[in-house]
Image (tube, rainbow, N blue to C red):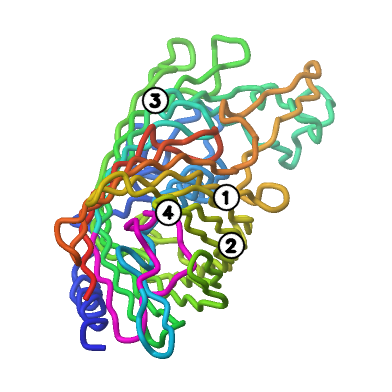
Amino acid sequence: MTRLLLPLCVAILFAGLPSTTHAQRLRDRIAQLFFFPSGDVPVNQGGHPHPVTAASIQSGSPIVFLSNAMAASVANVPIGATTSGETFRFEGGVPVSTATSAGPIFAERGQTLGRGRVLAGMNRSTFQFSTLRGRPLSAIDITLVHENDNFAGCSAANGGQDCAKYGVPVYENDATRFDLDLDLAVNVTTFYTTLGVTDRIDFGVVIPIQQVSFSGTNVAQIMPFGGPPVTHIFGGTPMNPVLRATNTSKGDAFGIGDVAARLKVNAFNTATTAVALLADARFPTGDAQDLLGLDHFVLRSQAVISSRFGDFSPHLNTGFLYRAGGQQNHSVLATAGFDHLLGRKVTLALDVVSEFQIGANRLLLPGPVQYEAPYPRTINPTSIPDIRDDLINGSVGFKFNATRNLLFVTNALIPLNDGGMRANYTWTFGVEYAF
């Protein structure tokens, strides 16, 4: 049990560290991209100023969508299996080895460690996000339109036109296009320990330590509806306006992520087949404002089935992902693959790791804007496609037995579809020790 407490001590140590070296949080840094040139007014809007505060910018749907998508993707880094290396079943209280290969990497097998046995591991995952729903992060565009302005006396000031119509007054047709080039890099060092509580029950703790770096450039272009003179400007005058501006923002954060507790119960075990139930609870210990956590409770519950045919061991994990926060969908989980002993000390692990969202997207994009005047038309406010955030990844890795108890792990995770915010690949390197 004292071995199991080591990761908890690490968590307490890192929880006492500051999550970032900057006063401004990463979500603030994302919002800051939309401020031109600085301060609380992102766009100087000529004769019709509409002051916009930092709070209102951050609550704007495109900015909320971007920051929530980033936070969800950072917190969704997979963690190592609860068991690894040699596993056992017990016949008359005597342990009998049930594994020839070293087991899967990000999937689970049905066997448990055995009473009193401990698995301790550490891995490091490194990745840089490259796409959002298939759209390159270096080429995201957002168009912000004017609010529907219907002030007292508006109709009289506009020749008796109905100001309730979108497009009256005429300056409501002005829009601002933002061309974004975003960069988000993540390094996650994960410490995990699993203890065999009984011959059929394992309990584990997982502690991620995360480093997140963000940088971005935003080129803004006001698109006036006619003129000069124009109403909305970045600078200059209505007759000689400055309609284009550029802004940059960057920041980084370091700290503990969302800590997880895992419980696996073996329900059926023979010499060739094992069935288990797994629960993985993740707690909101990471700072959501610095993209280090989700700010809500997450529970994964899965059924695990694994078999063994000589050196070849297929497995299937399927279950449900519950998210307590209202901004992300619950999901159905499915992982299928195999691990195979290639040589006396080398195991190959291949998996398809998938997560399918339930219901319509809760992480909402702004919808198309319908203008009524001076003529009907529609503006799409973003190039980000409105598709489901299903995640399908291919996982290929190797485990190397340095000794009977010591394993080295290497793995590549590659996206197989366009849902969510994704990296081209995620590299993971780790070490595990069983005793």
Q: Is residue 372 left or right of residue 317?
A: right
User: Are the two marked residues, 2 and 4, in contact with CB atoms closer than 8 angstroms?
Assistant: no
Query: Which residue has dot 2 on it?
Result: 321
The image shows residue 196 at horizontal and vertical percentages of: 36, 82
Q: Tell me which amino acid carries mark 1.
A: Glu
User: In front: 136, or 174?
Assistant: 136
Query: Which residue has dot 4 on it?
Result: 310
Q: Is residue 376 visible?
A: yes
Query: Which residue has dot 3 on it?
Result: 138
User: Are the two marked residues, 1 and 2, in contact with CB atoms closer than 8 angstroms?
Assistant: yes
Q: Tell me which amino acid carries mark 4.
A: Gly
Query: Which residue has dot 1 on it?
Result: 355
Q: Tell me which amino acid carries mark 2.
A: Leu
User: In front: 160, or 169?
Assistant: 169
The image shows residue 139 at horizontal and vertical percentages of: 44, 23
Q: Secondary structure at mark 3?
A: helix
39 falls in the magenta region: no
Categorize mark 3 by other alpha carbons within 10 Å: few (<14), some (14-19), many (20+): some
User: In front: 10, or 326?
Assistant: 10
Magenta segment: 97-122
99 falls in the magenta region: yes
The image shows residue 385 at horizontal and vertical percentages of: 61, 30
Could you give the CA–CA distance between mark 3 and mark 1, rounded to whole angstroms? 26 Å
Q: Vertically, is 95 above or below 127?
A: below
Q: Secondary structure at mark 2?
A: strand
Quadrant containing the C terminus is: bottom left
Could you give the CA–CA distance between mark 1 and mark 2, rounded to whole angstroms? 8 Å
Categorize mark 4 by other alpha carbons within 10 Å: few (<14), some (14-19), many (20+): few
Q: Secondary structure at mark 4?
A: loop
Could you give the CA–CA distance between mark 3 and mark 4, rounded to whole angstroms? 48 Å
**Mark 2 or mark 1, which is nearer the start of the sequence?**
2
